[in-house]
Amino acid sequence: MKKHWWKALGIVLVIYTIVFGFIGEVPRLPILNETIRNLYFHVTMWFAMVILMTASLVYSINYLRNGNLTTDLKAKELAITGFFMASLGLVTGSVWAKFTWGTFWTNDPKLNGTAVTMLIYLAYFVLRGSVDDPQKKGRLSAVYNIFAYVMMIVFIGILPRLTDSLHPGNGGNPGFGGYDLDGTMRIVFYPAVIGWTLIGIWITNLKIRYQKLLWKKNA
Amino acid sequence: MLKMSKYWLGFCAMLFSGMLAAQSKMPEVEMADVMRANGKIYVVVAVVCVLFIGIALYLISIDRKLSKLEKES
Amino acid sequence: MPAVLILYYTFATMLVQVAEIFKLNFTLEWRRKQSFLGVVLYVLTTVYLAYLVFSGVITPEVWNALFWVILIFASIQAAFRSFQNEADRRFLLYFGMVKPQVLIIGKTLYNFFYMFAIGLLATLIFTFLLGNPIASPGAFLLILLIASAGFSSILTFVSGLAAKAGDNPALPAILSIPLLYPQVLTLSKVSIRALTGFAWDINAPLLLVLLMLSVVTVLLSYLLFAYLWRD
């Protein structure tokens, strides 16, 4: 159990999120009503994605320093799981948007940032597919991962500020990002982020071990 | 000084009563109180929990299979 | 004191080498004008296509949108070709002494001027075929300059990456276009104002931010290019 404690913790935290996500107290906001509970599921996907992508970045940097193919494998698998969670976040967000705003997609900085992020990681996967030699594949994709990640952070940090300077405020919908994360939601939200991230790491861990076994078998 | 505090008291009283009046005019936000009141919310919780526990058990079984393979090689 | 001298010396040699790379790219481009003419033709054909498709419906907004889309694709072409030149590769072998950092800075600088030229050309062709709605040409020129800086800094690096990654022809576009979204968003917002009515106080901070972005990108490419170019 010593090795697996964090997996159990992930399961426990997500069950906690499910139970208290539905039963617990939430702020009573117009337009959103009960859908604000989506914070525990939709928004946590994005937070988990950011954590996984950051881990992928760290492994990419490490790969450039040590050239160990396992490090590259970890970077790749973390990016894949992160992308999977981003896709779930995207679909759940579109469903939520259709119901709340009447449209699946809208020209909002958060959504543009999402598009940039997902397209960048898709490009990362295409790049990996284009190169055959494992060392070269690792090196080129690590460089792109680092470059694109820094660009992404610069953009996601700057873009909202740019559009804010032109259009102060954002409609009348309280669901636009200024969530009042008061105490009642925080006690479920933060454990939820940790729980979903741990589940994401578990899935990545399984895939990495599977791939290493395949390497051993083919060697 | 006493005159100032009398005016302040009057001002605060008006402010307070104004706030009370505003409260009664605020619209009630519709939430799922009915579902919570008659216990049906627990069904939703139970369903989602079952879904997730099922997925978690699947993950555990995959994990065990991998561990077994790793021990063998 | 000697530390300062050494720093100065290395910086000076680097500048000289950057100038060399710049001159090299320029001379190569002029000797075999095919590459440049290819990009010019690309712009011409796409603008004419836009003219045909949008016949009659050219508002300033449409003009603006088309301009930036076509300029982006043309710039991607230009940047990728700069790494594909055969003669370029031979010279690079001879220039084995040149550090990769110098190479990328030199190429980025060269591409900056190249893309600005393409931008000017595109503006001319657009004006010829689709009319000239530009209200503040000075502002528009500045926007073009900053756009060239931004595009060149990102596209040069990513094209280098794509060139090393093999023959997938769609790869440069796939890799670079998402990285350009924020720039394009801002540029098109600012340039529509150059077409309709430009005010310096709202737009100056945006342009400054874009400029800073280019600086950050060049810094990043300086740090990372060495890992790319090992072969």
Image (cartoon, coloured by chain):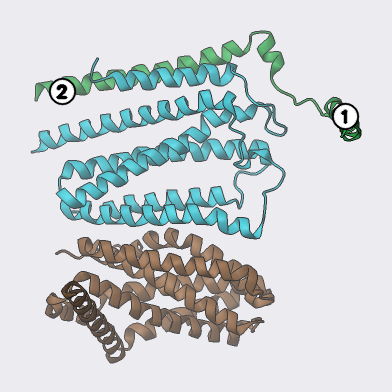
* Chain of the residue under label 2: B
Choose top left, top right, bottom left or bottom right for residue C17.
Answer: bottom left
Looking at the rendered structure, the kind of residue marked 2 is: Leu
Measured as percent of width and height from the top left, residue C29 is found at 30, 86
In the figure, the shade used to draw chain B is green
Q: Residue pushed farthest front?
A: B1
Comparing B20 with C23, the one in front is: B20
What residue is drawn where x is 39% and y is 72%? C152
| Residue at mark 1 | B9
Residue C173 is left or right of residue A98, and the answer is: left
Q: Name the quadrant of the N terminus of chain A.
A: top left
| Residue at mark 2 | B69
What residue is drawn where x is 60% and y is 57%? A163
In the figure, the shade used to draw chain A is cyan
Choose top left, top right, bottom left or bottom right for residue C64.
Answer: bottom right
What residue is drawn where x is 55% and y is 74%? C67
Q: Residue pushed farthest bottom?
A: C31
Residue A35 is left or right of residue B11, and the answer is: left
* Chain of the residue under label 1: B
